[in-house]
Image (cartoon, grey):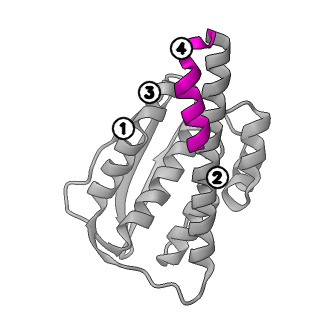
Amino acid sequence: LGFLNLIYENLQDRLRDEEKKHFQFLLDSGENLREVVEEMLQMSTLQKEDSKLRRSHVSVRELVQSAIEKVSLEQEAMGVTVKFDPPEQEMILFVEPDLLLKSLESILKNIIIYTLPDGIIFIRVEEAEELYKIAFICPDITLPRDEVDIMVNDFYNMESQITKGVNGLELGFPLAKDIVEWHGGQLWVPDGG
């Protein structure tokens, strides 16, 4: 990837616009592949029974807001708005913050990818029986229910994103689900999306 970037930097002044687009596609694809490999390594680490979490106390509000900030470019590119009305009371989790943030970010990225332009994603946090529930509500999602079920549980979305022409690969929901379950939580899509 570094070598490809070096070639591009040295040649970009001599390339036509069409050739620059192809180079940019290669660079983006390479970066995306690097991220997929990193996520797969994270997932394999999660699956080891002797893995230890480095837990700390973290605000649910801050985690959600950080995840929203991390996907701001995707929101802008896809023309999607994310609305989060933070809870009034402070909600604190004892979690591995970086992993849980990655989980929330993956969930949001995948929802954004499959949301209609000008769509809105609502995020709501509520307390439910000594647990915190983070709900992502998106009335403008374009994915049929049967594909949502497959995407949440399998690596199906990798191929689906290629065939549907959506730019990029992500482990998304399967990785997010493993991270949430590793923390003792659950990730699911209720009936109705």
Q: How many marks?
A: 4
> Under tag 1, what secondary structure?
strand
Crowding at label 1, few (<14), some or many (≥20) Cα neighbours within 10 Å?
A: some
Check residue 5 in the rendering and tell me which mark sits there, or answer none.
Answer: none
Q: CA distance from mark 2 to mark 4?
A: 53 Å
Q: Nearer the viewer, mark 4 or mark 1?
A: 4
Q: Position of residue 181 (x, y in %)?
A: 54, 74
Task: Judge from the rendering whether residue 164 lies leftward or rightward of residue 37; answer left or right.
Answer: right
Viewer-side residue, 69 vs 93: 69
Question: Considering the image in quadrants, where does the N terminus appear?
Answer: top right
Check residue 13 in the rendering and tell me which mark sits there, or answer none.
Answer: 4
Q: Nearer the viewer, mark 3 or mark 2?
A: 3
Q: Which residues are magenta?
A: 1-16
Q: Identity of the amino acid at label 1?
A: Lys
Q: Earlier in the sequence, mark 2 or mark 4?
A: 4
Task: Judge from the rendering whether residue 7 lies leftward or rightward of residue 65; answer left or right.
Answer: right
- On the image, numbered disc 1 is attached to which residue? 83
Q: Nearer the viewer, mark 4 or mark 3?
A: 4
Check residue 191 in the rendering and tell me which mark sits there, or answer none.
Answer: 2
Q: Position of residue 108 (x, y in %)?
A: 49, 46
- On the image, numbered disc 3 is attached to which residue? 76
Quarter holding residue 173: bottom right
Viewer-side residue, 162 vs 134: 162
Q: What residue lies at 47% left-to-right and 76% top-to-bottom?
A: 183
Dots 3 and 1: beta carbons under 8 Å?
Answer: no
Q: Earlier in the sequence, mark 3 or mark 1?
A: 3
134, above or below 78, in the image: below
Viewer-side residue, 21 vs 158: 21
Q: What residue lies at 53% left-to-right and 51% top-to-bottom?
A: 107
Q: CA distance from mark 3 to mark 1?
A: 13 Å
